[in-house]
Amino acid sequence: MKIGVVFPQTEIGADPDVVAKFATTAESLGYDHLLAYDHVLGANTASRPDWRGPYTAESMFQEPLVLFSYLAGLTTTIELVTAVIILPQRQTALVAKQAACVDVLSKGRLRLGVGTGWNEVEYEALGANFHDRGLRSEEQIDLLRQLWRDDAISFTGEHHKITDAGLNPLPINRNIPIWLGGMAPQVIDRVGRLADGWFPFVNKDLSNQIGQIHASARNAGRDPASIGIECMIPANTDAERVKRLQDMGVTHVALVTMNQELADPAAHLDAISRGHDTLAEALI
């Protein structure tokens, strides 16, 4: 099992030195990967009294691919993971270009987690259709992989058209792992058919959901063992729970320090230091 840590977007602040210290400390502690959430815009709840989303205009978010461009030059081994970029609200070719550049600058350390999101406010602002985002994302995944693989492509889909054009630079391996977020049945099926991995929430049906992914993979002629599973877990998670997740088929975990009433960035660093010891104990 690979162990990572979630970059505490909403609580770490905007000081670039503090941002850098979190990432370099995580790497020095031995974490395998650093994972960052994504939101472009937050809704102003003053005009939305019935807002139920977990994030608002008051929630700070670094843009993950920009963040990772900065951290690529400050780290050497830790994998950089988006979990997840809201793909259908973005232009596919631009995401392909940005991801390829981060992959090159980090020497192949990018894992691109993508999802369809829940925040219609962002879709409106970015000029994207909220209502066909799931199906559109499948075409986007296909196009991303073609753009990363070939020097130039021609592509005609329902939502995209490219005529004999390509990216430069290409990713180091001419591929970047694509993992999916989301818990809906259609997402679970999509993971089995298309994705390199999945970011589920820990829930009582997780074992069955992993089984559904494996069944979908077999139906698509894929090896279920090639699909990774990553769960985010609170910093105070005990070793036994981590071991149960591993036994269930979870291949990666990421420690979360947000929303745990930590006073300042130093407290987040203390939490990931203690948490690494717990995770290491679980995996001995």
Image (spheres, grey):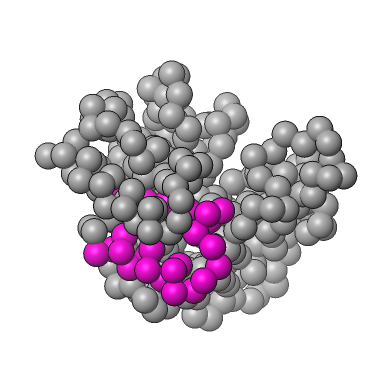
Q: Nearer the viewer, residue 198 or 143?
A: 198
Q: Is residue 51 left or right of residue 90?
A: right
Numbered range of the magenta stretch: 2-28
Give above or below for 199 relative to 244: below
Extreme-front residue of the structure: 263
Give above or below for 106 relative to 277: below
Does 105 lie within the magenta span?
A: no
Q: Nearer the viewer, residue 185 or 82?
A: 82
* Total number of numbered discs in the rendering: 0
Picture coordinates of residue 136, whole percent (x, y) = 69, 47
Residue at position x 45%, y 56% in the image: 264
Give above or below for 269 relative to 48: below
Extreme-right residue of the structure: 47
Residue at position x 64%, y 67% in the image: 93
Picture coordinates of residue 101, whole percent (x, y) = 50, 75
Q: Is residue 128 left or right of residue 113?
A: right
What is the quadrant of the C terminus in the image? top left
Picture coordinates of residue 228, whole percent (x, y) = 36, 42
Residue at position x 28%, y 45% in the image: 275
Q: Is residue 34 left or right of residue 191?
A: left
Q: Main secondary structure of the magenta part?
A: helix
Picture coordinates of residue 283, whole percent (x, y) = 17, 39
Give above or below for 246 relative to 2: above
- The answer, for residue 249, to whether it is visible in the render is no
What is the quadrant of the N terminus in the image? top left
Q: Nearer the viewer, residue 71 or 182?
A: 71
Residue at position x 79%, y 44% in the image: 45
